[in-house]
Every structure is written in structure tokens, then in C-alpha cells.
Amino acid sequence: MDLERALADVVGARHALEDPELRASYERDWTGRFGGPARVVVRPADTAEVAEIVRLCAAAGAAIVPQGGNTGLVGAGVPRNGEVLLSLARLDGIGEVDAALGQVTVGAGATLAALQAACSHAGQDAGLDDAARDSCTIGGVVACDAGGARALRHGTARAHVVGLEAVLADGSTVSRLSGLSKDNAGYDLPQLLVGSEGTLGIITAVRWRTTSALGARVAALVPVASTQAAAALLRALRAEAPSLDSCDFFLDEGMQLVLEQQRRASPLSQRAPVYVLAECAARTDPTDELAAALARAGIEDALIADDTRSREGLWRLREGHTEAIGHLGVPHKLDVGIPLAELGRFLEQVPRVVADAVDGARTILFGHLSDGNVHVNVVGPDPEDERADDAVLGLALACGGTISAEHGVGVAKARWLERARGADEVGAMRAIKRALDPAGLLNPGAVLPSAGWSVLGGLGRRP
Amino acid sequence: MDLERALADVVGARHALEDPELRASYERDWTGRFGGPARVVVRPADTAEVAEIVRLCAAAGAAIVPQGGNTGLVGAGVPRNGEVLLSLARLDGIGEVDAALGQVTVGAGATLAALQAACSHAGQDAGLDDAARDSCTIGGVVACDAGGARALRHGTARAHVVGLEAVLADGSTVSRLSGLSKDNAGYDLPQLLVGSEGTLGIITAVRWRTTSALGARVAALVPVASTQAAAALLRALRAEAPSLDSCDFFLDEGMQLVLEQQRRASPLSQRAPVYVLAECAARTDPTDELAAALARAGIEDALIADDTRSREGLWRLREGHTEAIGHLGVPHKLDVGIPLAELGRFLEQVPRVVADAVDGARTILFGHLSDGNVHVNVVGPDPEDERADDAVLGLALACGGTISAEHGVGVAKARWLERARGADEVGAMRAIKRALDPAGLLNPGAVLPSAGWSVLGGLGRRP
């Protein structure tokens, strides 16, 4: 029996998609930059079906690419060369939120928004948010260790993983969903899988740590004169506003682009080089605390949004960047982390090194100030042209930063990993990969560049 | 040149101890239950010396046992069969605490108390505490993923590790001390090393996440009628007292033992089967919040300690257990984690299963209620007699719990690991161990039972 037939027997014919038209939305990422043909798209219903698929693929020597909401930005969740595309979308159950314990079990295919809603219903807070909330899934969030704006206070996805369930490359299942907040019996395989982007195992469910809901929120949009001033403001807010929940930034070029795209006027009376968007959350109204912290930081001009509607209006300025940039062309989206002390230098130099690398390339910057986490968006270069990417990542390393803060390595940055981490550390990673996936069938080419990969066609370019 | 000579050339003759008298304190754990002869004790001064020691030992095929403060309870930090004992005690530097960022770099050999003092000096809080604070070292705390009472709010050691530096089995060094709070470029080797008990690498420094100091503290000692009532109280406090910082428990037998040992009278007017010791910490006095939460939980009888001296007096009742039990003989100290729903059953049954296993064995229980983390102390059985250990661990698993919550597996529980985790998961752990330490030279016999180990003499018994 051929593999396609065997897989269809496991998931049912309706959930084994061989028709190119049905497969299409699984084969290309939303930016249009990454993707390639899948051998077949399978949509299992539960962990047992995932395990059976992995066993069948292992026996056939077929490579597997796991996919959640297909919102990734580094090509880790789309096929490249005829792999089996395993969609976790149907594993979308969410268990009962244990509010007293602060935990809930979530299927890998549940969206972040669905988890947030379930938590909210129980008086809890998922503690993590990002602009892709309606589409991105918890399995993907954990597989790439997503962070978002609120990582400042609540940590990245890793901090929320009490335990998880995953299918390993041999089809065995690791299950740690009992919710024990202390459990150090042996190596913590769940924490190893966090951020491994589907290359060491396929996450099927997560025991998620929630936090008490903090119903009172206030945001401030603060125009500042420089990134140095923005970093100083962040430090002041961290010291003076214990309810600080997030602290993002964007630049004037992005602001103007978003305002034009959203056909609205700036809520501020004047333009500034840099805008800081800070939000506080507490049980009781944190407006006075935020205002006092801003005053102590010497800020005289800030727009305070203390009701939901105006707060969301401010966030649309920040979150609208992605859509506004998308209208300029297929963006190269690079997510880097820079030590705060070097952030000013990085932000100042990056547009120039990009323009030097590719004539006419345009750079739009925004990100999570609190983590030195900069989203570098480059429009202009062809999707296949990696010169701008190289310039940005090289500058990030020169500034003591990382080539990936929260998007992951995927296929986009795999060939950069050794330069970022050094040969010894990548050697240890390769040893772990060989140990858990000796045949290299789980998401080949992601994170660690596979030897044959560049020969097969670079970054999974359009066929 | 023989290995001893070569090691002495690296660390200096004064720090390569071959004299049995000088070696003695490194060769036996403080309970007196675990230990054996070391080939030599080496005390390197820095990471480069650690790396050189590992390279020399690798070339000579000599096994290494890393040791921090030698406060471990599972025999993971003492030699068993003539290994090289590598003490990290001299790597005790503590860098500047960055209060605004909430981070500090700490040498593996710095004690927890030294880190706490450095944080406090900078208006920060290390966020982790345990009774061994004056001796246990940060390297050991991270290597076993220690938790303690405050893990309720701040997580175990893992949650505090922004990054770390470690020497791997081939002598290469992994270094992630730049303090980037988001960095997912490749597998998170630091998080894999957390809790691996020196079997995958030797931790030399840690980038530690601190938290804002909360200067106002209040504790309450609450006598309750049963463990069910204690668990209900915990849930109520979690829901009603957001400043809850820890929630421990002990039983009347332990209370009486401690009072007798400390020659003091009970601060409570009446005895009760179970005592809950809860503490709140906040920027402003949390006494009203705690009192209100207790009232809403239906607690009428509680001793509130709102000054440092009386608060410390209450904690001495809890922390005095270890010393008081030590006076009864060499204890078997078993650290397990039990789901809250099963905690009552476990606590009720454990004294009986222990007594059934070993005639006359006495069981004293206390622990961190918030994590279902029970410290089971058994006195009576010989150090070599493992029947009581087996009874306790078997009951923990039968209750859906873990054989190790925060002490680690060490050599004490290695042969239990497969029963706890299953063959598939332990198989994956073995593959990782082989990948990173193919010759099996790092802390052999700890965590994963080595094939030859049982032949060589069980648990590293007294020679």
C-alpha cells in the first residue's frame, strides 16, 4: 500500500488532501515568501493519529513538516520539497481552566485567541499576546517560543509551558500534562521541544500556565526624540511602574505609513522620531501609577488612553504596521534581539546597511522595546534576494544581538545559525537532532541547515 | 604525565586535593547517606580551568562529578567510585545587578545567600529561597532545578535562568550570558542543562532573572483540621491574595518534634493535625489583604506575624524540621510532587506504606503545599535499605505524582526513572545523554542508571 493511501486510512479520506487546489493554502506562507509543494496534506484528529502518521512516514522514510496556523515568518511551517504536511489544526480542544491553580490544557491546534477567550471566561489571563492571535495556534506558539509585547512581564511561551505532549520521530509519545509545577524527574524534554520548531518532535497539546486577570488597563503613546530616550524611558517605567505590562516602539516612517493606510490622522499634535507605546495592567486602575512614572521620567507630552476603545486605537498604530508594510510588496521580515545598550546604534545603522546591500530597499522598524526585540521589515528586494537579510543579521550579531528573538530560525536563517552560535554549540544541537531524529524526517532544513538542502533549491523558493 | 599531575598543573597544587583528609568533606553528603572515594578533588578558579580539566579527563577517560555546595539530597554531587570531583566553589563571583533590566550574572559557586544579598543591595529580589541558602550554590540550584517555597509565585530555578555558561563533555564551552530575554536561535541548550544534574554539562555561570524587591511581608500560621482543608485554603489564598508569595505546610508530629528540639512552646494555643504557613509580599503592607483572604476562606484561628522577628520565628518551625529530623538518625529524604487533588490520600497513606515496608520506620512530612511538593522524611531504615524509599515513590506514582519535585533524581532515584517516565521517554533521555556525552564521563550513574552501576555497588554506599 502506498503512503498516501495508508495516511488516508488513518485520518479519513476527507482529511488527506492530495488535490493541488485543496493543498494550496497549506503550501505557501502568508507573506508569500516561503513554501513549496507537499506530497500530501494530512489533518489528524488527535494525538493517536499524529503518532500513527509519524510511524507510517518513518517506515516509508518520508519527511514531515508540522503546521499550526501557518502564521510563521521563517518558512518553518510550510513544505519545501514534497514533504508530508501535517496540520495540527483539528487538535483544537481547550480543557477546563483551573483558575485556582492557574493552568489549562490546550490542544496544539487551538488558536491563541481561543485560549485567551477561555482564560478570560474563567477570570484568568493567558499572559501572552501577539498580532496573529486569531490565526496562530498554541502548538506553533510553543514550537517557536513566541514572545510578543507582554513577554516583558509574563515571559515568552516557554514560561507558560508547565508541560506538554508531543510525538517523537519514532512515533512514541511524550506526555507531561499532569500539571505538576515542580517535576524534575529526568531531563525536561518539554522545555527542549519549546523553540525547536518541529524538528525534534510534534507538539500535540500543552499544559499552559495562566495568570490572574488584571482588568484595569491604561496605555500611553509617548513621542520621544531618539531611541536612546526610548531606552531610558523603558528603564524608568520598569523601575517606577510595577504594573508595566508591555513597552513597544515604532518610528515615524512606520507611523506615517500606518496613518496613510488606515486613513486616519495622528492622535498626536506633533511628529517625533520615535514613539513608545507602554501599557500598564493591574487589579485597580493603574492610570495614576503610569502618569506618575512618566512624570518622574521627565515626559511632558504623552497621550494617555484609559478606556478600551482609545487603547485599542493606539495599539492599531503599532499592530497596523504589518498590514501597511504588506501593501508595499512581499516583505523580508527579520526578527532580531539587540542588547538595550546597543539598540540605538542598531536602529540608526540598519536602514543604511540595508540600502547599501540592495539599491532602493526600504527598511521599516518596530518592535518590543522591553526585550530589545526589533522587527526589521525590508521591502524592495526580490523574495529570493538574501543580501538585505544578510546585512541585517550581520549587524545584529555585530551589536551583540541574536539573529532570532521570537520568530525562530526556520529555513530563513538556518544558514546563519553557526555564525550566531558558533560551531561548538551548533555541533551540540546537531548531536541532539541526530539523537532524537536519526533519519532527519522531522521538518528537515529548518533550524539546522541540512547538508543537501542548498543543493535542492535554497530557501524553498517558488517552483 | 599522569592525570593527577596534569590536573594540578591546571588548578595549582593547592587546589588539587589528593590527601584523604582534605578530600573528606567533598566525598560524603551532609546527611551521611551518599558518597564514596574521589580520585582527586580539583578546585578550578574559572571557566577556562573547568574546560581544561574536562579535556584532560576526556583524554584520560576519567569520570567527573561536579559539586557545588554539597547540599544535595540524592547523591548527585558526591563521588561514588573514584571519579574526579570537580568543585565549582571558587567560581563565586557575582556581577553587577542591573535593577532596571532585572538581571545579574552569577558564578556557579556563589551561594544562594550571596546572590540574595547582592540583589537586595540593588533593590531587587533573587525570587528563590530555600533552607540551604547559606551553603547551596547557584550552579547546583540550577543543575537540579531547585524550587523552594517561593516557586509558587516566582517559579523554580528554571524560570530565573535567562541564560547560562557551561562546559560540555568534549571541553567546549556554551556561553549565553548576554541577557537577551528573547533569543530563540536554535535549541535552548541552557534550558536542557537546567535540571540535568551535571550529566550533560558543567554549569559555570548563570544569567539570573531577578524581580523587584517587595519589602512588605506578612506571614500567617494557620492550624487546619486536615490536608483537604489545607488544599482548600491554598486555593482560596491563590484566588483572594494576589500577593501570596509562599504556602508551606507541616503536620503535628513534625511540629512537636521541632518544638522539643528548639526548646520552645508552640505559638498557637491549640494543636491541629495540619499547619499551613502562608506568606504574602508586596510593595505596601499586605496584612489586610491576607487577613481578608483568610476570613473569606472561613479561617477564624490564625497567627499573623507582621514583623520580621515573629515572621522568622514562624519560618523556624518549618525550616527547623530538617535539623530536628537529623537528630533522629540518618534520614531517607524523599522529595515528591503530588497533584493537589490526590495530596490528602498520599499524606494519609504514606506513613502506613512506610511502616509496612520497614518495621518501626517513622515518617515525618512537610513541604510546599502550593506545588503539591512533599518532603517525605523516613527515619529508622539503614542507609542502604531502600524498601521505604520504594514504598514512598511507588505511592507517589500511584497518586499520579512525580518521584522528584525539586531535589533531582541523582543516584538515589535513578533506578526509578523508567517506572516514572516510561521506557520511551527514558529512551529519548538516553539518546540525548549519548549525544552530548558519548563516553559517559559526566556524573555517571546520576539521573540515568548506568548499566554497570548496580554491579559496582548500588547507591554509592559507605565503603
Image (cartoon, coloured by chain):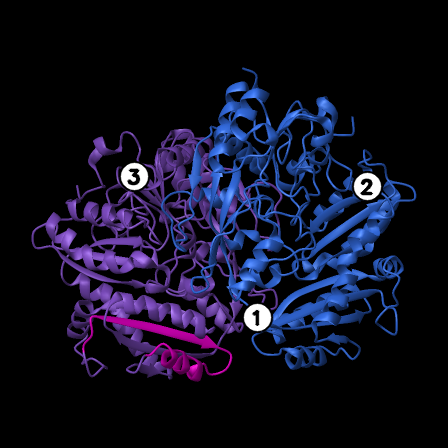
Chain colours: A blue, B purple
B97 versus A33 height, above or below: below
Mark 1 neighbour class, 10 Å CA radius: few under 14, some 14 to 19, many 20 or more = some
| Subunit of label 1 | A
Q: Amino acid at mark 1?
A: Leu
Labels 2 and 1: the sequence-earlier one: 1
Residue A360 coordinates in the image, percent (x, y): 92, 44
| Subunit of label 2 | A
Mark 2 vs mark 3: give the one in front.
Answer: 3
Q: Amino acid at mark 3?
A: Arg
- Residue A155 visible, this angle: no
Mark 3 vs mark 1: give the one in front.
Answer: 1
Picture residue at 45% right of the left edge, 50% below the top:
B45
Q: Amino acid at mark 2?
A: Ala
Residue A375 coordinates in the image, percent (x, y): 74, 52
Q: Quadrant of residue B38?
A: top left
Q: Which residue is mark 3?
A: B419
Q: Could you give the CA–CA distance between mark 3 and mark 1, rounded to whole angstroms?
A: 41 Å
Q: Which residue is mark 2?
A: A388
Q: Is residue A407 magenta?
A: no
Q: Could you give the CA–CA distance between mark 2 and mark 3, rounded to whole angstroms?
A: 52 Å
| Subunit of label 3 | B
Q: Which residues are magenta?
A: B271-298
Q: Is residue B277 magenta?
A: yes
Residue, far left: B359
